[in-house]
Image (cartoon, rainbow, N blue to C red):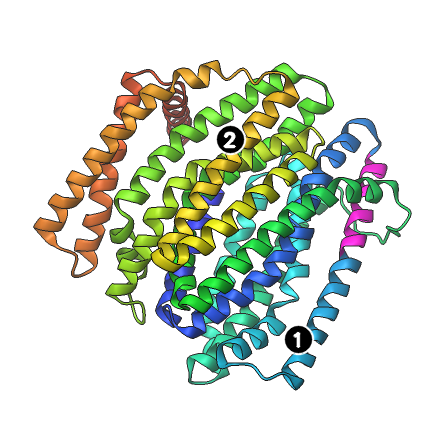
Amino acid sequence: MATATMTSRVLGMVREMVYARFMGTTLVASAFIFAFQIPNLFRRLLGEGALTASFIPIFKEKERTATPEEMWRAANAVISGLVVVSSAICVIAMLGITVALKFGDFPEKTLLMLRLLRVMFPYMMLVTLTAVFMGILNARGHFFVPACGALVLNLVLIASVYFVAPFFGRTPQEQIFGLAFGVLAAGAAQALFQLPSMRREGFRYQWVTPWQDETVRRVVRQMIPGTLGIAAFQVNVLTTQSIALWVNPAIISYFNYAVRMMELPQGVFGISLATYLLPTLSGLAADKKYGEFRSTLRHGLGHLLFVNLLATILLTTLAEPIMRLLFQHGKFGPNDSVQCGIALLWLAPGLLAFSGVNVLGRAFYALGDTKTPMRISIFCLVVNLVLGATFVWPLQQAGLGLANTLTAFCNLCLLGFALRKKLGKLELSELRKMLFPVFICGLVGIGVALESKILCTKQWGHAGLVPRLIEVFVPMTAASLAYMGLALLFKLEPAREMTALVTQRFGVAKKEAT
């Protein structure tokens, strides 16, 4: 799953590079990004957030205790209810926007954002269905193919820049609508990509009236707290971005590119691990194997700490060179690389906390508890809103990064404390033992990365593709080898297991080739 996610995230970075070349950090870019956030709000409310977190444990329980017919009937009931609700939201939202555009008097940036939002809003329904399909497949033990759906999404989005946008006009304000329609096509393609695997598992869609269905009622009861938490999060994002849009529209674009860069390592390991853990921990909780539950959680957190600490080191020490290599083309200039690098520098330290929150949140969902993460989330979002509004004025995009980082660590600590209280104990002694050696590995990695970057910049500069590649990948490789080598010297469990896995897979591949 990490392999599929890494491929899709790399392709996602290519998409962001194409977007940066096409629209840079202009007003058009900020309007597009802001408009796209709103269907994402409802996607996370109804799809891959609260609904799937509530539905997967129940679906897993049906898989263990009910017949296949009853299991698929429950899935069809939830899907039917989702189609009705999301369709109603789309119709109401699009009609409301149309009325606002007809009778309202808006500034240019708001007018463009609303017109783009009207086009992209149905994406919410498409990607919501995709998220539920992926959740069902994950519960059935399939991870690689669902994760590959993002590949299809990104390919269509990239294609829309080159093959759709030019037909919408000559100016960026006109061509941006090609990207908006590309978002709809990408959402449809990603949903359809999941269906063959669903059919092989035995899924056949049939309308099931959701209103009186017991599974739907259980899912709704479970998802209400999670929905409130996710709604608070998305409202928080929109509020802080609205403040940033008013302070300086470019802040949104700077911060968005930093977030996209950080999502690469977060998705490759943090999200992949959290996605895998939800059905795994749900199965252990259903069987009341709480010892294995704690062991699996501790094991996952140990690997998460080890891998994402290295990613954090590389993102912070190489923030500006990475932005320069990936995005400095076309309308994305040298100053944009500097500004986006500043945002990434302050956001990247939160990578460990962001990933840890995802994993601990899945532990609560597996136990059937969506209220505790919701309460903690809402508290932390209030903190984030206050910090973001305070820091964005003097620090601009760095302020948003700092606010998100501090809030993520606050969220992680509160979730850990609540989970320990819920389970009685977490059995994290083995994890605590590795903190000091991992810290030493991290310090060595930072030193090697910084020294290598300084040497490469002095020797080759960064004018041209080859010097930029050297400026990023030489320090990255040197720091990674030093970090991993020292970890093996300390005999850290994650380093030894990952090395053994790679060696084993390489040996198997070599044997098969022979």
Residue furthest right in the image: 212
Q: Mark on residue 413?
A: 2
- Counting from the top left corner in percent of width and height, residue 451 is at 15, 39
Determine the secondary structure under disc 2.
helix
Q: Which residues are magenta?
A: 68-82
Determine the secondary structure under disc 1.
helix
- Is residue 216 on the magenta stretch? no
Mark 2 to mark 1 CA distance (whole Å): 41 Å
Given the image, on which type of amino acid does mark 1 rest? Ile
- Counting from the top left corner in percent of width and height, residue 199 is at 72, 46
Tell me the chief SS of the magenta region: helix
| Of the two numbered discs 2 and 1 in the rendering, the one whose residue sits closer to the viewer | 2
Given the image, on which type of amino acid does mark 2 rest? Cys
Q: Say if 403 sits above or below 241 in the image.
A: above
Q: Say if 294 sits above or below 7 in the image.
A: above
Decide if residue 230 is on the left or right side of residue 399. right
Among the two numbered marks 2 and 1 on one chain, the one whose residue lies closer to the N terminus = 1
Q: Are marks 2 and 1 in contact (CB under 8 Å)?
A: no
* Residue 14 visible, this angle: no
